[in-house]
Each structure stands twice: as structure tokens, then as C-alpha cells.
């Protein structure tokens, strides 16, 4: 049974729903502005896949409520940065935007055809298509003039990112510990996260030294390059890969994307995926760090990513007046991710890096 957008999002306390409804009405040629939703799936607390019946066909879109800086990054990716690299077809097409409030923007994207890359196994023909696209992003953007603007809008994903986010996570956790009335269970969670962050902070200088030696030239990085953000479809003659969710796009070393991508595959298949990438960059100035350095750098990059995932939900839990169960759920998830973190190349775990 078709529903209005208000009905679909009822009780979720999301800003700007009328503006999003109007944008969808224009997109799907609904004169009243009330495009009716035929089907919907919640992908996260701020991301939904919606299906509409228009005069021509049934169409699916993904709507996302983004904070304003993330929205600016995604819009620059779609309209400026990737077109400048000749990769305008790489992301999902941004169909419409709508104001959420002063701090948020709704984006409406096409629902990209195909299926997410399978993390359970390295299906090499599909992975090869994905790796070719990832390598093209890195090769074409290395030392490109657009990196100056991309760093200003998207931020740094190198040593500065490590320091800023790890220290920022520590600050947010401290604010929660000292200023938030919470349960004993939640306080234990916060103290455990703070201990984890303290260990990461001790490696700040080490990460900078490794990047200076092995990081290579800066490139445009996706910033959240899990296989689940890669959609692969069967084309007429070969697989075609596209990359979605550019919320964390910025500028940094290839290691930042590469470590995130590799770490989600089974450990015994990562070498094969890594070889595919090395083949793609073989005749360029880009280089993968030596295995032992790669292992340590990947672990530190992952720690910085996890720290960055703490900042937003911790801030929300500290300042929100309504229900923030979602924020605590995200902090629990990040804590679990720390436990799940493993060496990128486990066979080298006992070796030391000489840098």
C-alpha cells in the first residue's frame, strides 16, 4: 500500500521531510508534491531506499540525510572532482537535494543497478572490476590540481587526519564521561573506548614517520572504501563497478583506501586482491608499501577511521535532548569493531617494521 513520505518517516524525528517530499514530487512529476512511496527499506537511521511509481515506470532512489560538510563533499565529488578526472560515471547519480535544516541536507540518489561486492569471498572477476576503478581514481588524481580544493572541502586523510580524529574522539569521550548522566553499562563502554584511544594516541608520531617514508603522493581517496560501498553489475561484455557513499571523501595516501578495502576480505585472499591493484599501478609513480610497513600503516589507518566514527555519535549523545539510543548503539558498534580488528596480512604479525 502506497504511503506518503511523512508516513514512511513517521516518528524518526528527521528534519526537512516536507522539503524532501517536495523534491521527490518534482522528480517524479507529482503535481501536489506528494509523491507516494510504494516500498521502502531502512538502510540506516538516516538512509532509506524508496520506490515510486511514476507515469512512465517504477523507479527506486536512495535518500540520505547528511550533515552539511558531508553534503558539500558529495556534491563536489559528483559535479566537480570526478568529472575533472574523467570519472563522472563512477558514483551514483545525484538526482536532487533538499534542505534539512541549517546543519543538514537531504540527497536523493539513483539506486545503482547491480549488487554489492561480496566480502565473504574474493570473486576475482568482480573484484578485478572494482580494483580497476579504485586504481583509476588514485592514478588520475595523483598530484592533480583539484587536490587543493578537495583537501579544503574534504579534509586530509593522512597524518593530520590521524591526529585530529584520535584527539577529537578522546575529547568527546571525556565530555560524555564527565558531563553525561548515564548507566553503569554505558560508563564502562566509554572508559573502555577511552583506553583504546589512549593506545592509539601513543602511535601518532610513528604514523607520520611511516607516511613520510612509504605514503607516496597524495591522491583523492574515497575515505570509506569497504566492499559494501562498491556495486558491481554485469555489463554487455564485462563487469562494471561503481562506488557509492562518498561522505568521507578527502585527500591522502593510497594506503588509506587500500587498507580499508583489503581488510574486509578473507585474510587468505588479500594477497590476490593486492596483486590486482599492484598490476594496475605498475607503470605509475604510485607504490604499495612493503608488506611489513603496509601491515603497520593499515592498522594505524584503521584506528584513525574507528576514532572518527566515535566523534559524531558521542557528540549527539552529549548534546541531544531527545532519544539518542542510536548514538549509543553506534558507540557499541565501534567498540566491537576495535575487537574485530586484525592485521591486514596476518602472516607478518610477528615481524617488526624497520622504518
Image (spheres, rainbow, N blue to C red):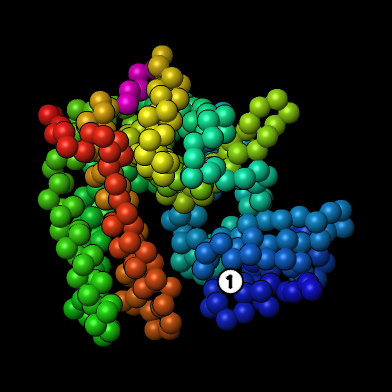
- Percent coordinates x, y for residue 273 in the rendering: 43, 30
Count of numbered marks? 1
Horizontal side of 132 relative to 26 (left or right) equals left
Position of the C terminus by quadrant: top left
Residue drawn at (23%, 65%) of the image: 193
Residue 328, image x, y percentages: 36, 73
State the image coordinates of residue 109 (x, y, percent, origin top left).
63, 52
What residue is shown with label 1? Answer: 16
Does residue 26 appear in the picture of this structure?
A: no
Question: Residue at left 48%, top 68%?
Answer: 102
Residue 64, quarter of the rendered image = bottom right
The residue lying at 43 percent from left, 41 percent from top is 265
Residue 252, by quadrant, is top left
Q: Report whether 151 appears left or right of 101.
A: left
- What residue is drawn where x is 79% and y is 73%? 1
Nearer to us in this view, 288 or 219: 288
Residue 163 seen by the camera? yes
Main secondary structure of the magenta stretch: loop
| Magenta-tinted stretch | 284-288
Q: In this view, does 319 lie above or below 313?
A: below
Q: Is residue 325 within the magenta segment?
A: no
Foreground of the two, 12 or 145: 12
Quarter assignment of residue 268 = top left
Q: Residue furthest right?
A: 55
Q: Callout 1: few (<14), some (14-19), or many (20+) C-alpha neighbours within 10 Å?
A: some
Q: Is residue 190 above or below residue 97?
A: below
Above-or-below relation of 40 to 130: below
Amino acid at each position: 500500500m502506497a504511503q506518503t513520505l511523512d508516513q514512511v518517516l513517521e516518528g524518526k524525528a528527521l528534519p526537512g521531510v516536507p522539503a524532501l517530499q517536495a523534491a521527490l514530487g518534482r522528480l517524479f512529476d507529482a503535481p501536489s508534491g506528494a509523491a507516494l512511496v510504494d516500498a521502502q527499506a531502512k538502510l540506516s537511521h538516516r538512509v532509506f531506499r524508496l520506490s515510486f511509481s511514476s507515469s512512465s515506470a517504477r523507479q527506486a532512489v536512495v535518500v540520505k540525510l547528511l550533515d552539511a560538510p558531508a553534503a558539500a563533499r558529495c556534491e563536489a565529488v559528483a559535479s566537480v572532482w570526478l568529472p575533472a578526472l574523467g570519472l563522472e560515471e563512477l558514483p551514483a547519480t545525484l538526482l536532487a537535494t533538499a534542505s534539512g535544516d541549517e546543519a543538514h541536507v537531504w540527497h536523493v540518489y539513483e539506486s545503482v543497478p547491480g549488487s554489492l561486492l561480496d566480502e565473504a569471498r574474493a570473486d576475482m572477476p568482480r573484484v578485478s572490476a572494482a580494483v580497476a576503478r579504485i586504481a583509476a581514481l588514485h592514478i588520475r588524481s595523483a598530484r592533480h590540481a583539484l587536490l587543493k580544493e578537495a583537501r579544503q572541502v574534504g579534509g586530509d586523510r593522512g597524518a593530520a587526519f590521524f591526529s585530529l580524529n584520535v584527539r577529537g574522539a578522546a575529547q568527546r569521550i571525556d565530555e560524555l564521561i564527565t558531563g553525561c548522566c548515564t548507566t553503569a553499562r554505558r560508563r564502562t563502554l566509554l572508559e573502555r573506548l577511552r583506553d583504546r584511544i589512549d593506545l592509539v594516541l601513543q602511535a601518532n608520531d610513528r604514523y607520520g614517520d611511516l607516511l613520510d617514508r612509504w605514503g607516496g603522493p597524495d591522491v583523492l581517496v574515497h575515505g570509506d572504501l569497504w566492499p559494501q560501498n562498491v556495486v558491481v553489475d554485469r555489463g554487455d561484455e564485462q563487469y562494471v563497478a561503481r562506488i557509492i557513499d562518498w561522505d568521507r571523501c578527502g585527500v591522502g595516501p593510497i594506503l588509506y583506501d587500500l587498507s580499508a578495502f583489503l581488510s574486509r576480505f578473507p585474510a587468505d585472499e588479500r594477497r590476490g586482491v593486492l596483486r590486482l591493484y599492484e598490476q594496475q599501478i605498475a607503470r605509475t609513480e604510485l607504490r604499495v608499501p612493503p608488506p611489513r610497513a603496509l601491515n603497520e600503516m593499515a592498522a594505524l589507518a584503521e584506528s584513525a577511521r574507528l576514532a572518527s566514527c566515535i566523534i559524531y555519535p558521542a557528540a549527539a549523545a552529549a548534546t541531544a535532548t531527545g532519544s539518542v539510543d542510536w548514538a549509543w548503539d553506534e558507540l557499541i558498534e565501534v567498540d566491537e569493531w576495535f575487537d574485530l580488528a586484525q592485521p591486514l596480512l596476518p602472516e607478518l604479525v610477528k615481524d617488526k617494521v624497520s622504518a
